[in-house]
Amino acid sequence: RSLVRCAATDTERGAPKLPKGQFRPKQSLGQNYLQDPNYAARIVDALQCDSERGKRVVELGPGLGALTKLLSREYPEMVAVELDERAIPLLRERYPEPITILEGDVLAVDYSALSAARGGKLSIIGNLPYYITSQILFCLCDHHASVKKAVVTMQWEVAQRLVAKPRTRDYGILSVVFQLYASPKITCKIPNTAFYPVPKVTSALVTVDFPEDRELFPVQPAKLRTVLNTAFRQRRKMLRQSLKSILNGKPCPEEFATKRPEELKPEEFLELTALIFGRDPETPDSSGEAVWRTQKLRE
Ligand SMILES: C[S@@+](CC[C@H](N)C(=O)[O-])C[C@H]1O[C@@H](n2cnc3c(N)ncnc32)[C@H](O)[C@@H]1O
């Protein structure tokens, strides 16, 4: 049925038919294609990139082009990165140069180099494959200085974690990191019926703005990561207990000793890290270094 659906849409567009039987959505690649044009328009509207001819627009996982179709009209020099080799010839045919279709893994893209090549910060957009949503988000955090904004869809539960406030169930590493590097906002809910195949879960459209003038952390991001990982590994425990392994026999800073990680605001994790490891400000040109994307983060 999915083939009929895709083929019908393609024929309407005058684009070549998908080879029968060869383009079934792959669950392993998180292929839930957007089939509701209203949501496609809404996602694209949220981007508002003013780079010349859209040359700093980067779409993650264009798939069969549900978003690319709209994006390409507004941003004729955009870039799109797709891993599924079956989609590449189709995308290149429908969206020829000056649009750039890159074949590869979105986690392996050097966004800092791409931003330098395109002369400014990138605007990222994508209906993300669910199986690697958190990794993609952490990857963007690593490249924070090269990204202006990200407009992305994800599982509703992950979106809740991004925007969660302290003392709530959803508050964790993802919340702390994203609220320190950026301002994430849920733009709207997207029902599962907007996708094909219909996933079990509801989605959210999330807009993440990376501010121009963020203050540099007073600590190295890798040290912050160690504190977050260690604290949230035992999120029910008081920090004087859960942080023992990184305190090296020293007492836990008094103001935090009897707190649990979920009680600390994002900025307080910076303070706590500085108290444990000393002040050692992050370097302004460290963007792109693999800090967040290398770790298997625990929540
Ligand atoms: C949820 S689908 C969205 C497709 C299309 N943008 C749409 O909205 O219909 C996710 C897309 O990401 C692609 N994808 C999955 N893993 C990827 C990766 N690691 N790198 C690049 N693309 C990937 C899938 O092949 C698929 O096309």
Image (cartoon, grey):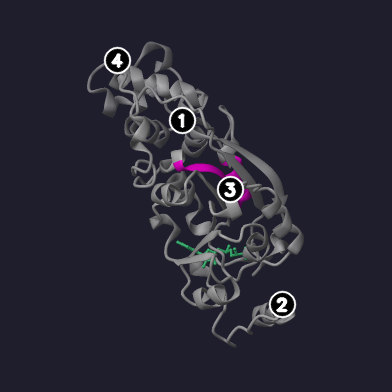
Report helix, strand or loop for mark 1: loop
Real-space Cα distance between discs 1 and 2? 55 Å
Report helix, strand or loop for mark 3: loop
* Residue 182 position in % (x across, y down): 53, 35
Q: Which residues are magenta?
A: 146-161
Judge by depth and name the residue closer to the eye, 106 or 227.
106
Q: Is residue 219 above or below residue 195?
A: above
Residue drawn at the location 27% of the way across and 23% of the way down: 247
- First in sequence: mark 1 or mark 2? 2
Q: Which residue is mark 3?
A: 51
Q: Residue furthest left?
A: 248
Find out whether the residues at labels 1 and 2 contact each other: C-beta distance under 8 Å: no
- First in sequence: mark 1 or mark 3? 3
Residue drawn at the location 71% of the way across and 62% of the way down: 194
On residue 236, the disc is 1
Find out whether the residues at labels 4 and 2 contact each other: C-beta distance under 8 Å: no
Discs 1/2, front: 2
Q: Which residue is mark 2?
A: 13
How many residues crowd mark 4 within 10 Å: few (<14), some (14–19), many (20+)? Answer: few
Report helix, strand or loop for mark 4: loop
Name the image quarter holding the C terminus.
top left
Real-space Cα distance between discs 1 and 3? 46 Å
Real-space Cα distance between discs 4 and 1? 19 Å
Amino acid at circle 1: Arg
